[in-house]
Amino acid sequence: MSAPRPAGQPLVEVRDLVKHYAAERGWFGLGRPRPPVRAVDGVSFAIGGGSTLGLVGESGSGKTTVGRTMLRLQEATSGRVFFEGSDVFALDSGRLRALRRRMQIVFQDPYSSLNPRMTVGETLREPLKIHHLSGEVSSLLEEVGLDPAFAKRYPHELSGGQRQRVGIARALSVEPRFVVCDEPVSALDVSVQAQVLNLLADLQSRRRLTYLFIAHDLAVVRHIADTVAVMYLGKIVERAPAAEIYALPRHPYTRALLSAVPEPDPRATKRRIVLSGDIPSPAHPPPGCPFHPRCPHPKKSERCRTEVPPLREVPPQSGHLAACHYAEQPM
Amino acid sequence: MTLGTWFALLVAIILAAEAVRAVRHRAFGSERWRRFFRHPTAAWGVGILAFLVIVAVAAPLIAPFDPDRQLDIIGLKNHPPSWTFLLGTDVLSRDVWSRIVYGARVSLGIGGLGALVAVSVGSLVGAVAGYYRRWVDAVLMRTVDIGLALPRIFILLMAVALWDRLPFWVLVLAIGLTSWFGTGRLVRAEVLSLRERDYVLAARALGAGAGGVIFRHVLPNAAAPVIVSAALGVGNVLLLEASLSFLGIGIRPPTPSWGNMIADGAPSVYTAPWTTVAAGLAISLVVMSLNAVADGLRDALDPHEEGGAT
Amino acid sequence: MLRVRDLKTYFVTEHGRGTARAVDEVSFDLYPGETLGIVGESGCGKTVTSLSILRLVPEPPGHILPGSLIEFEGRNLLALPAPELRAVRGNQIAMIFQEPMTSLNPVFTVGDQIGEAAIIHQHLSRKAARARAIEMLKLVGIADPEERVDDYPHQLSGGMRQRVMIAMALVCHPKVLIADEPTTALDVTIQAQILELLDRLQQELGMAVLLITHDLGLVAGHADRVVVMYAGRVVETAETTELFDRPTHPYTEGLLAAVPRIDAPLARLHAIPGQVPAATAWPAGCRFHPRCPYAWDKCIAQEPPLLETGVTGHAARCWLVTEPERRQAKR
């Protein structure tokens, strides 16, 4: 059994998580091996109970893989994850099943996240049965703002926002403490997106949930996260309390991401930083700082091309981490 | 034909029509069945298949003669169709209609059981390969490649070398075990894509075991292509049995199957065409009905069609 | 330049459940050299509107009703015989789509695909078409165009494919470019690149752009005028700054308040309650009334016409224009 947690210790902790995908080989594994895809390349963070970490990145950044390996939906290559003090990767299948009551996930695509052949009621009853819980489908539906009559409907009869609410109810059915929200609002229309974000915030305060909120949109994350981590090519390049990172982004990539968010204000006079080039393939990350080929920082130097910048606190003891050689002089 | 056999035939037709009507009636309650019956041919397919199954089951009541009895080898040889011999007689003076009726037992039996074997093996192999991937997948799929590359007739001829004339159950197994390769591929592809769906991941995240995931979330969603391929498979097996019998390695005479009826009638196809045409039509009718039913099933089982969201 | 009047595009739904009035009496004008934004959420009819302009709506199940008018340089495109319509398509009015992956044919090189329109419409030789393709690739900012011209679509990244799509659309120097969600499928930093490119090309080539999007942020930064659509109708139209300063229709107002922002004070997001109704059963009266915070009996009884607000070019389909005091009372 895990020892009782001392106060102030995080609920979830990820230490040096790595996930490499071996490249496909030919028949029976013959053929020349190719470099692995480094989807996640040494990621560490901790989330305190009841708070939200926003994990932001573009496609190929590895943000989704982080969430899935934490729940052991994919096996990590190396690294460790601690949940309430116990080592998640060391659990046997029985303990893992018990753990899955405590850690849940909400998916991005409301169309593929529900089994099309099961009614909403069947979908919600399944986890209750697995864990012998006494929860009620109707109260779960009410909690996510749906009429209990929805239990008889099939997913195709629901709108995207309603499906997403069912997905949230399914995650809540086992009374978790920690929920990975994997881009839960990216596929929704703006007005519905706001409904779902507000619902997630309400549920968090009502149930004292801890969230890992994965998104590609810094504006969305701002409305829910206490801490924000920005990923690029499998690495966290900046991590700071939310207010800090929006006020003074220290990594040039964060800065560019922020400036790329289209603001609904025709008079916005902010300077657009348009990055050149594409996101490199995680199978062939650039040497040195992974961001250097696209970096617009005026101080960019030879050092960026050769030396990987560590994630360090700037200024010291501030709780604001950035992986840039020139984090002291942000753009 | 006696009054009794006419009456039995009439009852069979009424029962088949009644079966279609009953299924159709249920259709009003279910979106899925409504979509099935949107194809007018699907209803005919169901009706014809139901009729043939009833005929096969009730063969002794419907057939006016013993199918193997040579009625009068001199006087009734290749007798053209008449009221007494509805579809005429064959070269051995046997009643063709009675042989069609009894042949339905054999042919539909081989078709149904053969397809069942093929689909079961195919689904199992496909599901295992798709779910476990890695070397299991590689080995099974290379087997499938080899199976698809070898001519089936060649394999069956080798089996004949062992048995001379194949007993019914060997024939069913031989046909079934050489017909599953396509289904296996189909199911594997389906399982490969389904196992990555978010609802499958969600079920795993909720603590569902491998069995629960496969039987609740993966296989039901793979059922549509499997059922459709099974319906088409029955037709294929039927045609295969016909060609095997035509080659003389199918069902052992004098037991009638639609395939060996064609083989028996082939020499006299110009002088007494009814002997072959009847069996040929029966086979075509079954294959066409199955195709119609498969078309209807394809639409009925497609969850994307549900709700008609455009 | 392009005049759309009373456009009605309906779809007959399968198994005769009814008619989906996807686009219902939509009117707007596009002037030379300007960018007109059409904004709305999924199901509002914006994409069907854009497809209707070039008569690309699949028929059946769709059909454009008689009485609709789409006038381009004095000719009604809806009445044009097929050969003449083809001479307009891709030549004078060009289109770019949302999905760069499925909009390019995987078996032809990008050079072939870019040059195709020039061969069809301008009767260029193969060699001249190839030279034109290289020139276009240079124009859309692709490095090494002489080499890229022989690449196949799968060899390019998402952002490059969208550039190729733009090059294809612009090869005949069209007068009107219809851009249907041109950046929705792209990452934020790539999206910024493509938008900058479109702005630059519009200035250089002097074409009019119809920008169709769900993103109010895009419209704010790139459109001169805006048309807001809801439930198959135009609900508000105005110059961009006017629309964002004084959103008049409650839907526009709600949509603006629902956008998560990074530059405004942090507050709970405003959500529009409910969801978009089905196109087969728009509500009677004002189609927004079931979701509108101000609705009163008149809104249920009678659908408002587009009412001038008093500012030039600003009109809204809302009774509040005639009774503005009701808006104040609600606040």
Image (cartoon, helix red, strand yellow):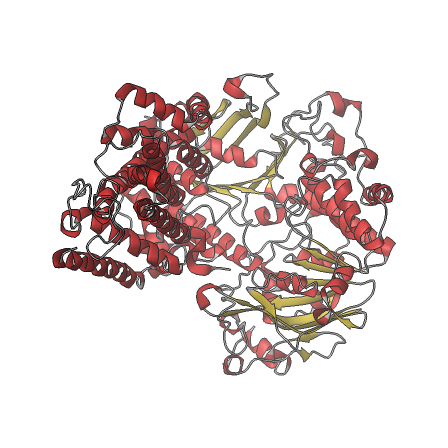
Query: Of all residues shown, which one is farthest toward the left?
Result: B4
Instruction: State the residue at coordinates (60%, 16%).
Output: A32
State whether residue B106 is above or below residue C4: above
Instruction: State the residue at coordinates (50%, 35%).
Output: A67
Residue C231 in the figure: left or right of residue A202: right
Query: Of all residues shown, which one is farthest toward the front?
Result: B74
The image quarter containing residue B130 is: top left
Count of numbered circles on the image: 0
Residue C193 appears in the picture as rendered: no
User: Quarter holding the N terminus of chain C?
Assistant: bottom right
Image coordinates for residue B184, horizontal then vertical, percent: 40, 33
Instruction: State the residue at coordinates (32%, 37%).
Output: B263
The image quarter containing residue A98 is: top left
Residue C283 appears in the picture as rendered: yes
State whether residue C101 is above or below residue B292: above
Residue C47 in the figure: left or right of residue A203: right
State whether residue B131 is above or below residue B309: above
Q: Nearer the viewer, residue B267 or C111?
A: B267
Image coordinates for residue C111, horizontal then vertical, percent: 78, 41
User: Quarter holding the C terminus of chain C?
Assistant: bottom right
Image coordinates for residue C78, horizontal then vertical, percent: 70, 70
Residue B10 in the figure: left or right of residue B156: left
Q: Nearer the viewer, residue B138 or B158?
A: B158
The image quarter containing residue A234 is: top right
Q: Nearer the viewer, residue A320 or C27?
A: C27
State whether residue C297 is above or below residue C280: below
Image coordinates for residue C116, horizontal then vertical, percent: 77, 48
